Amino acid sequence: MVEITTRRVDTNGIALSVQEAGDGPPVLLCHGWPELGHSWRHQIEALAAAGYRAIAPDMRGFGGSDAPDDIADYTLLHLVGDMVGLLDGLEIDQSVIVGHDWGAPVAWQSSLMRPDRFRAVAGLSVPYSPRAPRPHLEVLREAGMHRFYQLYFQEPGRAEAELEADVRQSVIRIIGNSDAEKVWDGMIAETGLLDAFPARDAPPAYLSEADVKVYVDAYTASGYRGGLNWYRNMERNHALLAPWAGAKVSVPSLFIAGERDLVLAWEASQRAVAALPQNCLRHAGSHIIPGVGHWVQQEAPDAVNDALLGFLRGL
């Protein structure tokens, strides 16, 4: 068994709760919403066993990490700054960075902005795409997609109240939705987000009750506000990323996703995946894992670990 330790590390004006295991070349693992560093548990063990130093923080606003009050403190520039500061706090010069869901844009942007610190990048679920001409939420509003979950999250307090009313149901319905017969289309129900997913009494096979307890305990203590604030900066991010319009990722890159991932159902994502060899100058390939949904590193850990370790060995 690999020993996983947890400590708090000061970075970029806040402290992050960080899980670590192993010695050797560092690999920084950035989770998405609504997850925690715990979502990388299978990768932490595999990386450590293979001779790498796995580092998995609870990201800003999540779990045991600090959650600033100001919504504007959750931009991609803050999040990339957290990852740079985390390397400084751990006295690491360079690391590979890996991100899933919201963590993928953090990883892509970290490698784009600081290739001197992040020597390679892997994105799970969300492919790299250069800055769009217009803000994404503006396009959604014009298309009349007012029930799309990202727009639902914009009003402070509304989604928090729904998700915190029954944290266990929130965890097992959202992170447990990949075993549903039909892939979720991203639209909320008339009554809210959770009713877009089937009610369930037990978690899916890829989440044990012990895993569920980790998530439930964390979100019961922290609430959901910190993570939701990432969505409330989407338009601000678009403005802040203007200096990197058209920029290409120069470090070695990899993409992994589940075949049944909601994100891959979007035409924009399909175009982004197809364009990865043009937008990522040293792209090592894309792995689309059959029969797997959005929570790919938890649903198919062996396939993800094989892809990641193959990529790392090739650096």
Image: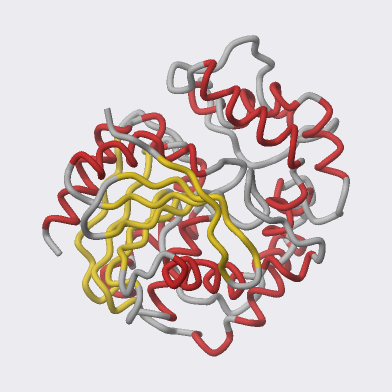
Query: How far across and down, in percent of the image, does residue 14 sit?
Result: 65, 65
Q: In the picture provided, is 131 more to the left or to the right than 250?
A: right
Depth check, front residue: 59 or 261: 59
Depth check, front residue: 24 or 50: 24
Identify the residue at horizontal 43%, vertical 22% (top origin).
206
Query: How far across and down, in percent of the image, does residue 299 sit?
Result: 39, 29
Q: In the picture provided, is 91 more to the left or to the right than 50?
A: right
Identify the residue at horizontal 44%, vertical 16% (top origin).
205
* Quarter holding residue 187: top right
Identify the residue at horizontal 19%, vertical 48% (top origin).
309
Q: Above or below — where is 175 with respect to 56?
A: above
Query: How far across and down, in percent of the image, does residue 77 sit?
Result: 59, 75
Depth check, front residue: 31 or 257: 31
Q: In the picture provided, is 11 more to the left or to the right than 222?
A: left
Extreme residue toward the left, this view: 314
Q: Above or below — where is 117 with respect to 202?
A: below
Query: How far across and down, in percent of the image, does residue 155 sit?
Result: 86, 54
Q: Above or below — where is 5 with respect to 151?
A: above
Identify the residue at horizontal 50%, vertical 28% (top origin).
178
Extreme residue toward the top, this view: 201
* Figure quadrant of the N terminus: top left
* Quarter holding residue 95: bottom left
* Figure quadrant of the C terminus: bottom left
